[in-house]
Amino acid sequence: MKPMTEQEIRDAFVNCTKGQAKRLAVPRDLAEQPWEDLDFLGWRDPQAPDRAYLAIELDGRPTAIALRSPAQRGMRRSMCAICLTAHTGGVSLMVAPRAGKAGQQGNSVGTYLCNDLACSLYVRGKRDAGAGARLQESLTLEEKIQRTVANVAAFIGKVTG
């Protein structure tokens, strides 16, 4: 993924107003992000931990979505629907308001995501989720990366569709 600026990220939001995008917390350490190892940039708002955000380049342009994570209920083993990493207590249902009129009417879509939104790093083995977290697969790393990007794109398609 190529590096994104704060303004590119703010301009890329598809499921919130321009005013909301202007006020949300963008990571201050964008220059230090491991961009070459990221398929998407995901982060949580440090002031509001139930809010998370995701930015990716799709079809040559940045796209970003706002997410909410409902309160956790217990610590059971779950699998991220984006990167297929299993965690004990490390996956949350994240809900995104739909874009446009559907979102204004309160419609949303959800998926299970790694709490830290570091799917790209788990896929590449740069972050460890513990024993048994990664399935044994015959896919190459490139194929796993392509699957992760396709899963994010499919979720964003549900948000914007």
Image (tube, grey):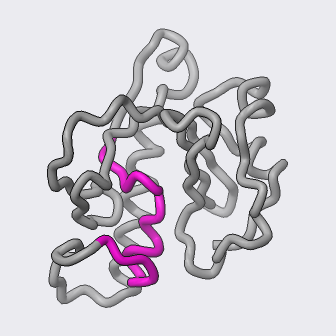
Residue at 23% from the left image edge and 34% from the top image edge:
73
Q: Nearer the viewer, residue 152 or 45?
A: 45
Callout count = 0
From the top left corner, tell me how far across and down residue 129 is, in percent: 31, 71
- Residue 44 in magenta stretch: no
Answer yes or no: is residue 26 visible.
yes
Answer yes or no: is residue 161 visible.
no
Q: Nearer the viewer, residue 139 or 47?
A: 47
Does residue 141 lie above or below 4 as drawn? below
44 left or right, relative to 114:
right
88 left or right, relative to 38:
left
Q: Nearer the viewer, residue 159 or 55?
A: 55
Quadrant for residue 24, please give it: top right
First to last magenta residue range: 111-129
The quadrant of the image that shows the C terminus is top left
From the top left corner, tell me how far across and down residue 80 is, in percent: 29, 57
From the top left corner, tell me how far across and down residue 155 is, in percent: 40, 46
104 left or right, relative to 28:
left
Does residue 65 lie above or below 77 as drawn? above
From the top left corner, tell me how far across and down residue 32 is, in percent: 74, 72
Residue at 19% from the left image edge and 77% from the top image edge:
131
The quadrant of the image that shows the N terminus is bottom right
- Residue 116 in magenta stretch: yes
Residue at 16% from the left image edge and 75% from the top image edge:
132
110 left or right, relative to 103:
left
Quadrant for residue 74, please give it: top left
Residue at 68% from the left image edge and 54% from the top image edge:
62
Does residue 29 lie above or below 70 as drawn? below
